[in-house]
Image: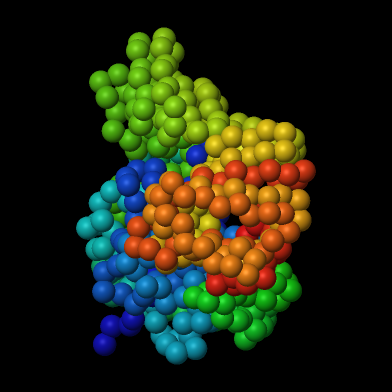
Amino acid sequence: MAATIFPVVLAGGAGTRLWPMSRQQYPKQFLGLMSDQSILQETVLRANRGFAPPILVTGSDYRFLVAEQLRQIRVQPAEIILEPVARNTAPAIAVAALIVAETDPGAVLLVMPSDHAIRDTAAFARAIETAAQAAEAGKLVTFGITPGGPKTGYGYIRQASPMAGVDGAFGIERFVEKPEAAVAEKMLAEGGWLWNSGIFAFRADRYLEELERFEPAMMAACREVVAKRERDLDFSRLDEAAFSAAPSISIDYAVMERTEDAVVVPVDMGWSDLGSWPTLWEEGDRDGNENVVVGDAIVENVNRSYVRSDGMLVAVSGVDDVIVVATKDAVLVADRGEVDRVKGLVEQMKAADRYEYKTHLEVHRPWGSYQTVDAGDRFQVKRITVKPGAKLSLQMHHHRAEHWVVVSGTALVTRGQETILLRENESTFIPLGVEHRLENPGKLTLHLIEVQSGAYLGEDDIVRFDDQYGRTGTNT
């Protein structure tokens, strides 16, 4: 009988090279860069092929984003594992493997990053079948991509002789990490080289055996982490001290480049890691002038460029080979060949303590979202949306009062000892220091305008008394 396949999706990266759309609190895996669905949703749905429910590994800050995006595509995960700190891919996969091995040590893990695109899903499905056969035979499989050119940002795999007993799987002669352009060109001219996709398949027990052999300290830390894990609503929360003790190493360095049982399954499936704006230009639908234009944008006498607006109208004229990306609060203009410097721009914003590196104007919460409309001395105006059946925490503020006006929907407001039901065009005032809560008891989304006034309007001026999402602290 064939082994059970557990998709494991790694969804914790930050993706700063895709700023201003990808930001620290809302990174690229949660964005719809190629379609109306996010990259994470597309990744999960590609693996929704009669396999076991997926396991998601993500950072604690992204837990509600992951849960909401899975809910939107009607996928119930087996686990959402919360990393308290980032420790690279090898420990993250080890935790998932240990959890699966508790009940099914021979199960095959199909490990995927959450931030890639695959155009030919049928080719991917065939590659999974081949990889599963090799994994069941005890091999540790990586998916090798037929190269589309001498890219310097990818790792490469040198394909060796065929694996006995499994058609389509091959041994691995060696790995080369991100070669210089001249070296990459020479490798492709030789033939037999593949891009390393970061997609893997192996039995849970075999991965743990090899990790024990090469990284015993990591295995000891991960065992302690799994033993101490706690349930938090729908999440598995890992112990921070124990997980921090695990060495931060990628699966390639920890296992794949050291094991004698690594094999590669070559596949041409229209794969891209969607790691930068030039990649999105390459993957996008280009017009007759080789431009990709997305959103409310107009171009004139422009060639070989990527122009995108998720906010205001963007008009571009008389330039070639540029990247122009506009959101509601920021605009990026860059030479298409220089966008690796975007990371440096983000570092400058971080050093200057600007919010734009970290979050968008629209901030997502488990109950809905809010967006700052206007702000000034001692006042701030926000547009708030609350999902049907959702409610904010019971809270109070030391430094601000709030005035709420319902635009549409129904609001159930707790204000001190009283409860008020507000409908469209009705309002209420929350004095400074009064306990309050906002709920949506209806079946339609609640839209509300909030006007804050006071000496300090920061999101850390929140004292929570009760919260159905288990949040503590200030603005999580």
Image spot of residue 50 (x, y percent): 26, 74
How many numbered circles does the render carry? Answer: 0
Q: Is residue 204 left or right of residue 180?
A: left
- Which residue is pictured at 33% across the width and 35% down the height? 284
Q: Give the answer, above or below, for where 235 lies relative to 175.
A: below
Snapshot quadrant of residue 122? bottom left
Of the pair 73 and 456, the residue shown nearer to us:
456
Is residue 49 toward the left or the right of residue 367 in the image? left
| 285 w.r.t. 235: above or below | above
Q: Residue furthest bottom?
A: 103
The residue positioned 34% from the left and 38% from the top of the image is 283
x, y percent for residue 268: 29, 50
**Residue for point 41% across, 58% down:** 410
In the figure, 333 relative to 362: above or below? above
Which residue is depicted at the point 51% across and 82% down?
99
> Left or right: 432 with respect to 92?
right
Pick whichever, 366 or 463, lies toward us: 463
Q: Position of residue 333 (x, y in %)?
A: 52, 24
Observer-nearest residue: 412 or 150? 412
Give residue 431's position: percent from left, percent from top. Answer: 68, 54
Specify the quadrant of the image occupied by residue 417: bottom right
Q: Is residue 438 visible?
A: yes
Q: Quadrant of the C terminus?
A: bottom right
Quadrant in which the N terminus appears: bottom left
Q: Is residue 99 left or right of residue 191?
A: right
